[in-house]
Image: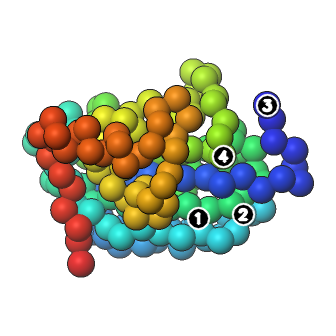
Amino acid sequence: MAVSSGDWSKVFLGLGSNLQSPRDQILRAFRALQQLPESRDAVCSPFYASLPMGPADQPNYINAAVRLLTRLPAERLLGEIQSIENAQGRVRGRRWGARTLDIDLLLYGQEIIDRPELQVPHPGIPNRLFVLRPLLDLEPLLSIPQFGLASLLAERLEAAGADPPVAVP
């Protein structure tokens, strides 16, 4: 179901960086997200350091999550966040490779979107503590469509021995 232009949708974004001062990249991206059109009330989680997914020959990541309200349709929001990535030097190279900035559209209200260019909820959420921890900081009782409570997903990963992200002061 499409959200009408008058409705506000609660959106969660995942941010990650491991190149060119990752903490500064995340802060700069958050400031840009605060300026998105037809959006308000952006809040950023604490930062976490995590091991890279995929190729190990890259620096560790800094990750965070952002919650905001928006009237932008999901596809337009995706375009806006890709523009922010590009403005910060994002080069789309090898999968899971090092990057200045990665912004993932994790949740768009309670919508389920399954298109080649956009999948919401993001399919990686249930397998990534570096995504779940910041989400839980923003919303401890978060329920994720198709996956359930974020807290239970995190507990399962921890019980299975997943590498926990480390809070960054």
Q: Earlier along the polypeptide chain: callout 4 or callout 2?
A: 2
- 157 up-or-down from 99: above or below: above
Q: Are marks 1 and 2 in contact (CB under 8 Å)?
A: yes
Q: Which residue is mark 2?
A: 39
**Which numbered dot is residue 33?**
1
Q: Which residue is mark 4?
A: 109
Q: Label 4 amino acid?
A: Gly
Q: Label 3 amino acid?
A: Met
Viewed as shown, does residue 160 lie left or right of 70?
left
Q: Earlier along the polypeptide chain: callout 3 or callout 4?
A: 3
Q: Secondary structure at mark 2?
A: strand
In which image quadrant can residue 100 be found? Answer: bottom left
* Quadrant assignment for the N terminus: top right
Of 26 and 155, the residue lying toward us: 155
Q: Earlier along the polypeptide chain: callout 3 or callout 1?
A: 3
Q: Which residue is mark 3?
A: 1
